[in-house]
Amino acid sequence: MNYDKIFQERLEKLKQEGNYRVFADLERYKGSFPRAKNYIGNKERDVTVWCSNDYLGMGQNKDVIAAMSDALEKCGAGAGGTRNISGTNHYHVLLEQELADLHGKDSALLFTSGYVSNWASLSVLGANLENCVILSDELNHASMIEGVRHSRAKKIIWKHNDVNDLRNHLSSLDPNVPKIIAFESVYSMDGDISPISDICDVADEFGALTYLDEVHAVGLYGKRGGGVSERDGVADRISIIEGTLGKAFGVLGGYISGSKEVCDFVRSFSSGFIFTTALPPAIAAGALASIRHLKSSEIERADQKRKVKHLREKLDQHNIPHLSNPSHIVPVMIKDPIKCKMISDILMENYGIYVQPINYPTVPKGTERLRITPSPVHSFSDIDFLVNAMNELWSQCALSRVVA
Ligand code: PLP
């Protein structure tokens, strides 16, 4: 059997659909991000990055970098093993304490990524709570979907952000079976925000655990960066808050926070925690510094809000269609995979603007988009340059506009 031929045929189909992914070869410049060097073959050029999830530029914050360098000098490179065997470092302990405090919980548990934290936690909870039913929002992230799948628990998908639909499903279940409501606060592709308080009301009514993914909200929302649940004053009503250290905190890693019992349970039974090497101490030290910084500094969050507002206003002035939402994510809708990739390529090629096309399976077919994430490290003139370039392209390529 010619395995490579099979792979090649599938890849060819992906290319024809316009869904084949090409990654820009970039090197971020510390201190001047969003500028980055783009390698193309043996050539190089400078570009501006517009699609990073380092939402607040914390990946180049001086305190974060100093903390990482210091930990690297003190502890060396890796953690040296799984935490079960030999890998728990004092920075992991400090970071878990900081995360528990961030969300007002008893405890927190670190993982190597947000993906792993969702996958590992939902799979272990669903598998070990006898007859558990997991009620999952229809737009939940792949990591949650995989966690639910792996748990083999009964799964119910409820309509996106629709509390009535959730209530209907809950009311059809045996009151005595354990139930977990799994949802996100900020949905990363449309940038909409869930009605957390209403979901908690329904959870209380039916005795369900709440599992909230705050990956696109931690660091960004709430007075101390505790996410939308902090902003809305409902963190204490959520059983498990999950987050990442790789987006607004600018480093790498994931976690859950909750009661002492639930964190200890996941720590004790989850293969995704037990059987993998712990985060390097320098990574934990950097995340710790980032969380501490964003707990007390409003500067980055306030500046980001100004930049997001400016971008939306500029797009509106030029009638460039973007989804309106209450978050920091600005999706510019193209609705065609080939055009989406083509526009992204021209922006990079002709204007040094890097915004990755977002195609299927990240979003449903027909909703392809450019997902723009303005941050405090973009200047107002960067934004003007971006929108002017898009405006030129919209005219040249006869792309549809909206009446503002
Ligand atoms: N949850 C959501 C909603 C996400 O969008 C992502 C990643 O984009 C993750 C979890 C995974 O987080 P991480 O990138 O830290 O693995």
Image: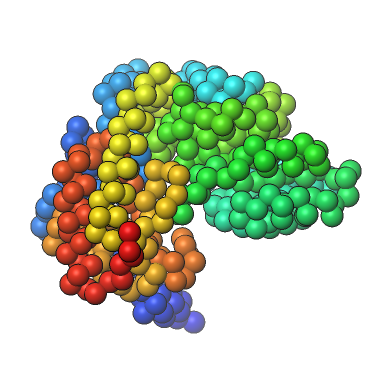
What colouring method underlies this structural image?
A: rainbow
How far from the left and from the top, in percent, is residue 299? 32, 25
Q: Is residue 187 above or below residue 338?
A: above
Q: Residue at x 31, y 71 (%)?
A: 400
Q: Quadrant of the C terminus?
A: bottom left
Report the side of 10 relative to 398 (left or right).
right
Report the side of 177 relative to 118 (left or right).
right
Q: Residue at x 36, y 79 (%)?
A: 16
Toward the viewer: 305 or 87? 305
Q: Is residue 337 above or below residue 16?
A: above
Q: Can you see residue 15?
A: yes
Q: Residue furthest front?
A: 403
Determine which quarter of the picture holds residue 289.
top left
How far from the left and from the top, in percent, is residue 102? 52, 23
Toward the viewer: 395 or 118? 395
How far from the left and from the top, in percent, is residue 24? 26, 57
Q: Residue at x 41, y 56 (%)?
A: 323
Report the side of 208 relative to 333 (left or right).
right
Q: Can you see residue 284?
A: no
- Total marks placed: 0
Report the side of 171 relative to 286 (left or right).
right
How far from the left and from the top, in percent, is residue 88? 53, 24
Q: Residue at x 49, y 66 (%)?
A: 364
